Amino acid sequence: MFIPKQAVTPIDFEGLTITDYTASGNLSSSCALIRVSPGVSHRKSFSKRSDKYYIVISGTIRFTLGKETRTMNTIENEVFPDD
């Protein structure tokens, strides 16, 4: 599957800029670029549409999964199954 950058329109989600390359597909996993500016936070949210794979390209991000808070650094990754 090839999806050119210009074929996808980024959306704003409470300060996050999300470019979801697989939003229109019915796939078992998703691929999106999420830009997070320093200091940005948003309400808790969830999706059971597909598995999520996160890789931090630059910087550090902190997030909560259930009751656990995690921190990811540059080039670390995390996989979140949809179940």
Image: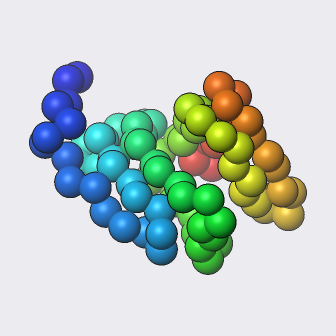
Judged left or right of residue 78, residue 2 is left
Q: In the orientation shown, which residue stands out farthest toward the front?
A: 38
How far across and down, in percent of the image, does residue 33 sit? 41, 43
The residue nearer to you, when weighing 38 against 79, is 38
Answer whether residue 79 is visible to the viewer in this image.
no
Q: Is residue 24 above or below residue 58?
A: below
The residue nearer to you, when weighing 53 against 71, is 71
Q: Is residue 37 above or below residue 82?
A: below
Q: In the orientation shown, which residue stands out farthest toward the left?
A: 7
Judged left or right of residue 82, residue 10 is left
Q: What is the basis of the colouring in this image?
A: rainbow
Give the quarter of the image for residue 45: bottom right
Answer whether residue 42 is visible to the viewer in this image.
yes
Q: Residue at x 65, y 40 (%)?
A: 59
Q: Residue at x 20, y 46 (%)?
A: 8
Q: Residue at x 54, y 41 (%)?
A: 52
Q: Is residue 77 above or below residue 45?
A: above
How far across and down, in percent of the image, does residue 41 sit? 63, 70
How far across and down, in percent of the image, does residue 6 sit? 14, 40
Q: In the orientation shown, which residue stands out farthest toward the right?
A: 68
Q: Residue at x 72, y 56 (%)?
A: 63
How far across and down, in percent of the image, does residue 37 sit? 54, 58
Which quadrant is the N terminus positioned in? Answer: top left
Q: Is residue 34 above or below residue 28?
A: below
Judged left or right of residue 33, residue 45 is right
Q: How many marks?
A: 0
